[in-house]
Amino acid sequence: MEISSAASAPSGASWLRRGFRPFFLAAGGFAVLSVLVWFASYSLEWRFAFGGLAPVTWHAHEMVYGYSMAVVAGFLLTAVSNWSGMPTLRGVSLLLLFLFWLLARLFLLLAGGDFLFAAASFDVLFMAVLVAAISGPIVRAKLWLNLAIVGKILLLLASNLVFYFGAAGKLEQGVYWGLYSGLYLILALIFTLSRRVLPFFIERGVGYPVKLYNNKWIDVGSLLLFLGFWLAELVAPNGPVVALLASALFVLNLVRLLGWYTHGIWHKPLLWILYLAYAMLVVGFALKAAVFFIGLSPYIALHAFAVGGIGMMTLGMMTRVALGHTGRNVFEPPPVLFWIFSVLFVGVLVRVVIPMFDPSHYRLWIGVSQWLWIAAFAAFFVVYFPMLTRTRVDGRDG
């Protein structure tokens, strides 16, 4: 998904030339800061304002609408420019969008409940401007199929509004509906974009000719089943309908994942991190079914989706996109990425797998996984900070 940058000379602050630059930096930094705060709150019982929210509610909201949306914004602002051949936000306009995102995070972390409306205003403004920024080039270029992605961002905006109405006491189920809709819409985006790019990345990246398997009925079937799964979760969480749909989604996505397999991925960290991330989404559906059938903790399945699927997929995509769009060779990534990805994957195992066999030390495993997450994203931030704040290595604009 590398942009074909214009050959014009660079101008303006380097970190504001493309959407991926400020938002990938923000995502990396916020991944560290937010989980440090969550560790202090959960394990050390420190008190924070959290915009008047319960600590666990703040944590859930900020991982979806804070961290994940920062990655989504950076990726889509960059990808839409590539798809349409038209510029998206840059310079002052990009800075303003970034500030809307940042102010929402600061109000929710540092201010009390009296400032919840201010946090909501900046959060909604951030998402509304993002929708406008990506839909304009898509419409002008008549890329009508990509309006489905715009539709998902609009649904995310609506879900965030529902959350804030719930947090303000105006909608009884608003907090739950907003959080879980946000989570599943982020997953829907990942499924859509993975179907587009993951087979392509693998076929290009393994270093030998390979044609991966895709099937139209799997694409359509998984989309319809996932829609039903999301709605069933809102109406009857962890019920029999959810379990049956999760089981079907497990089978369909496992078939898709196996069709994308080739042994060469294990020699390429930028490939195996994305493949394992998708595998964790598949595992997440199996665990979601197990919640109903064998009484597994729903938080195990939740974190398979969130830490495993979203965490690894977003980190893998940010590292690859940043390399390509700063003029670097995506086929020769920094060797340290192997260790960054490995640390995060171990953190996923500690958070998802070990508690199933040793629930008596549940808080310990949460703490260990938090620090492994922090270590992985701190390393990403340090390694990628120079890339994201300096001009492209090939001297082109972008």
Image (spheres, rainbow, N blue to C red):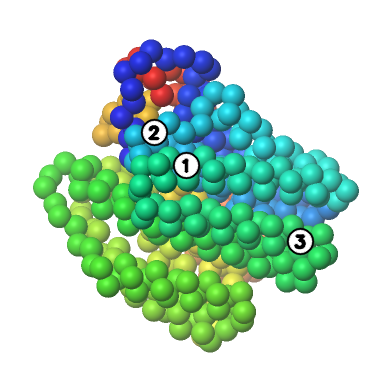
- Residue 331 at what x, y percent from top left? 26, 34
Disc number for residue 86: 2
- Residue 191 at what x, y percent from top left? 40, 59
User: Going from the N terminus, do you reach mark 1 or mark 2 first?
Assistant: 2
Disc number for residue 120: none
Instruction: Classify residue 168 by image quadrant.
Output: bottom right
For the residues bearing labels 1 and 2, Cβ distance under 8 angstroms: yes
Q: Nearer the viewer, residue 147 or 217?
A: 147
User: Going from the N terminus, do you reach mark 3 or mark 1 first?
Assistant: 1
Q: Quadrant of the N terminus?
A: top left
Q: Which is in the foreground here, disc 3 or disc 1?
A: 1
Disc number for residue 165: 3
Q: Badge 1 is on which residue?
A: 136
Q: Residue at x 69, y 57 (%)?
A: 161
The amino acid pointed to by label 2 is Met
Q: Residue at x 84, y 46 (%)?
A: 115
